Image (tube, rainbow, N blue to C red):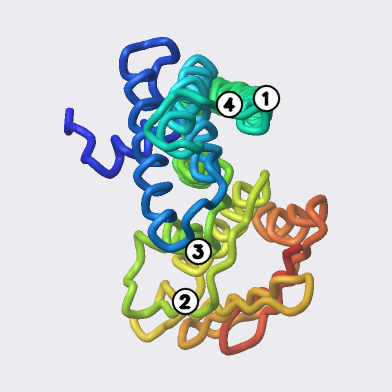
Amino acid sequence: MEKPGFAQSLRTMTRRGVRPGSPAAYFVAILCVATAALARLGIDVIAPNGAAFATFYPAVLIATLFAGYRSGAFAIVLSVIVGWWAFIEPPLQWFPISSQNILRLVLFALSAALIVWIAERYRRVVRQLHQEEHYRQVVVDELGHRVKNKLATIYAILRHELRGHEDVWQSVSGRLRALSAADDFLVKADGQGVDLRQILEMELEPYDSSRITLQGEPVALSAKLPTVLALVFHELATNAAKYGALSAPGGSLAVLWRVTGDEIAVEWVESGGPQVTVPTRRSFGSKLIERSLGGFGGSAKLEFAPSGVICRITLPK
């Protein structure tokens, strides 16, 4: 297994932090307070007698977010000690200390404690969200695995039952493969959506790419729409390879799409193939193409032009 790089390790550590209460957590507090003290010394050069604890507030916040409330509380104690000794009059001495400076120390400790409380609540929410995300990913992976196993079982059963009907088997197996490939895309996308071009490239991969033109801007599709759209493109590609433009040496296919308002318009245009005639009856594939997108607010319309089949598809954005 390849070891994670430094950048990835840093991102993971930043997201998860260090284990609260560990030596590393207290070291984080010391580092934050030391950095704050150096920054405070730098401010003294520019603006002498500035706010004594101005730079220690972010130190307490960072220590808590990164290493937990114990680290934040330890950072408060260190900040009070360093601020009292180095930045409260008289500097570099513990005593005498005025009642006003005592009040400043108390107010800093109380406000910093409030920061620690809020930051710790935020840490817990982030940690819970991370756990929920991990759980969701485990469930999605498991469901994807089970769906693939069920599809494989269905595939094997149908292969056996249709062994004497090769034409039917070729039609059914192609649709099953299209469903399986679309589901794989959805799982890999991890909820981010599947690009329309990816679906087209997946379905048109078996054919000569020099005869196929895909043109359009990136469009992400989510939920169940990519699966249904993969079936539609599979039917169109299969028909083009059997009877249409992709069945003849000089034929070509162009798929163009554009976003207009709240709709995505897709045009599947075949040309250069055998002359097309309007079929006398609608096949199952034609009905699937024209009816399957209706439940998603989309539509598909087939046109049997003499120069080649044209399918105009509209999808919700």
Identify residue for label 2.
Answer: 214
Name the side, left or right, on which 294 lies relative to 201: right
Nearer-N-terminus badge (3/4) = 4
Identify residue for label 4.
Answer: 123
**Label 4 sits on what residue type?**
Arg
Q: Quadrant of residue 311?
A: bottom right
Mark 4 against mark 1, which lies toward the viewer?
1
Find the distance from the CA under tag 1 to the CA under tag 2: 63 Å
Q: Secondary structure at mark 2?
A: strand
Q: Secondary structure at mark 4?
A: helix
Nearer-N-terminus badge (4/1) = 1
Mark 3 against mark 1, which lies toward the viewer?
1
Mark 2 against mark 3, which lies toward the viewer?
2
x, y (%) of residue 27?
Answer: 32, 22
Find the distance from the CA under tag 3 to the CA under tag 4: 51 Å
In the picture shown, does residue 79 fall above or below 233? above
In the picture shown, does residue 283 fall above or below 267? above
Q: Quadrant of the N terminus?
A: top left
| Cβ atoms under marks 3 and 1 closer than 8 Å | no
Identify residue for label 1.
Answer: 110
In the picture shown, does residue 156 fall above or below 6? above
